[in-house]
Image (cartoon, grey):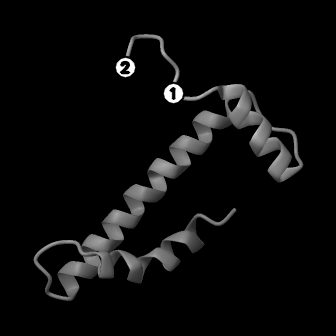
Amino acid sequence: MAAGQKLYPRATVKKIVKAHSKCNVTKNVDVLIFLDYALFLQTLMKEATINAKQAGERGISAKSVQKVTEMSLLKFKG
């Protein structure tokens, strides 16, 4: 990807979030959404790793991720 090239139009993301939430949003809402998403994935993988080790698996499987998904989603519900 070339330097300075944007991954997505920030204004479009802001409009979508504003329309969906029916609230005013801050200038950097897209960055906050991305950081929250990255934190969610990190938590999900950490919990899946713990679950897999407790189950005696050698690695993380889809089954171990599915078991902890609901719990991780509840932590990030806002």
Number of other residues with Cα within 10 Å of mark 2, as a class: few under 14, some 14 to 19, many 20 or more: few
Residue furthest out toward the top: 3
Q: Position of residue 53 (x, y in %)?
A: 18, 80
Residue furthest out toward the left: 58
Q: Position of residue 29 (x, y in %)?
A: 68, 36
> For this rendering, which residue is in front, 67 or 39?
67
Vertical placement of residue 71 versus 2, above or below: below
Quadrant including the N terminus = top left
Quadrant including the C terminus = bottom right
Residue type at numbered disc 2: Met
Residue furthest out toward the bottom: 55
Query: Regarding mark 2 in the picture, which secondary structure is present there?
Result: loop
- Residue at the spot 10% in from the left edge and 77% down from the top edge: 58
**Which residue in the structure is indicated by mark 1?**
7
Query: Regarding mark 1 in the picture, which secondary structure is present there?
Result: loop
> Distance from label 1 to label 2 (Cα)?
9 Å
**Which residue in the structure is indicated by mark 2?**
1
Q: Position of residue 74 (x, y in %)?
A: 59, 73
- Residue at the spot 14% in from the left edge and 82% down from the top edge: 57
Q: Is residue 36 left or right of residue 69?
A: right
- Residue at the spot 67% in from the left edge and 29% down from the top edge: 28
Q: Earlier in the sequence, mark 1 or mark 2?
A: 2
Q: Are marks 1 and 2 in contact (CB under 8 Å)?
A: yes
Number of other residues with Cα within 10 Å of mark 1, as a class: few under 14, some 14 to 19, many 20 or more: few
Q: Is residue 54 left or right of residue 40?
A: left
Q: Is residue 78 left or right of residue 20?
A: left
Q: Is residue 60 left or right of residue 27?
A: left
- Residue at the spot 82% in from the left edge and 52% down from the top edge: 21
Q: Quadrant of residue 65?
A: bottom left
Residue type at numbered disc 1: Leu
Vertical placement of residue 44 versus 31, above or below: below
